[in-house]
Image: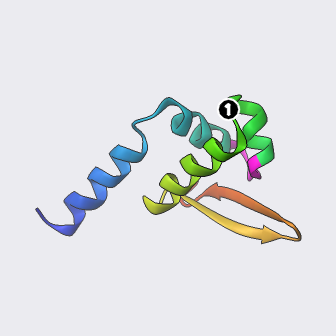
Amino acid sequence: MNHEDKMIAEVMKAMGHPVRVALIRALAEKEMCVSELNMLVHVDQSTVSRHLAQLKRSGLVTERREGLFVRHRLANPC
């Protein structure tokens, strides 16, 4: 298995949960912080953060600081 195969598997794994799919769909529209995403997917904030961490590890999501907030966005917007 080469590096590309591993990266594809990581992306597929990241997409393997309905909450993460919902987060990606929301981030395709605009940058959002965890509290905004939390209101959309109706799960607790720690769960949203955990799913975002998985999406970041797979390279699908990036973040930037804006004052006290961390704004999340798709790494390669559609």
Q: Is residue 69 above or below residue 33?
A: below
Q: Secondary structure at mark 1?
A: loop
- Look at the image and tell me in which quarter the N terminus lies: bottom left
Residue 76 magenta-drawn? no
Residue 1 in view (yes/no): yes
Q: Residue at x 52, y 36 (%)?
A: 21
Q: Circle 1 is placed at which residue position?
A: 43
Q: Position of residue 38 (x, y in %)?
A: 74, 38
Quarter holding residue 72: bottom right
The part of the chain drawn in magenta is 29-34
Q: Position of residue 46 (x, y in %)?
A: 66, 46
Q: Residue at x 14, y 66 (%)?
A: 2
Q: Position of residue 42 (x, y in %)?
A: 71, 28
Q: Nearer the viewer, residue 24 or 53?
A: 53
What's the residue type where badge 1 is placed? Val
Q: Position of residue 71 (x, y in %)?
A: 75, 60
Q: Is residue 76 above or below residue 66?
A: above
Q: Residue at x 50, y 53 (%)?
A: 55
Q: Residue at x 78, y 34 (%)?
A: 39
Graded by Cα atoms within 10 Å as few (under 14), some (14 to 19) or many (20 or more), the crowding at tag 1 reads few
Give the side of residue 48 with respect to residue 15, left or right: right
Q: Nearer the viewer, residue 48 or 37?
A: 48
| Colour setting | rainbow
| Residue at the right extreme, as displayed | 67
Q: Nearer the viewer, residue 77 or 62?
A: 62
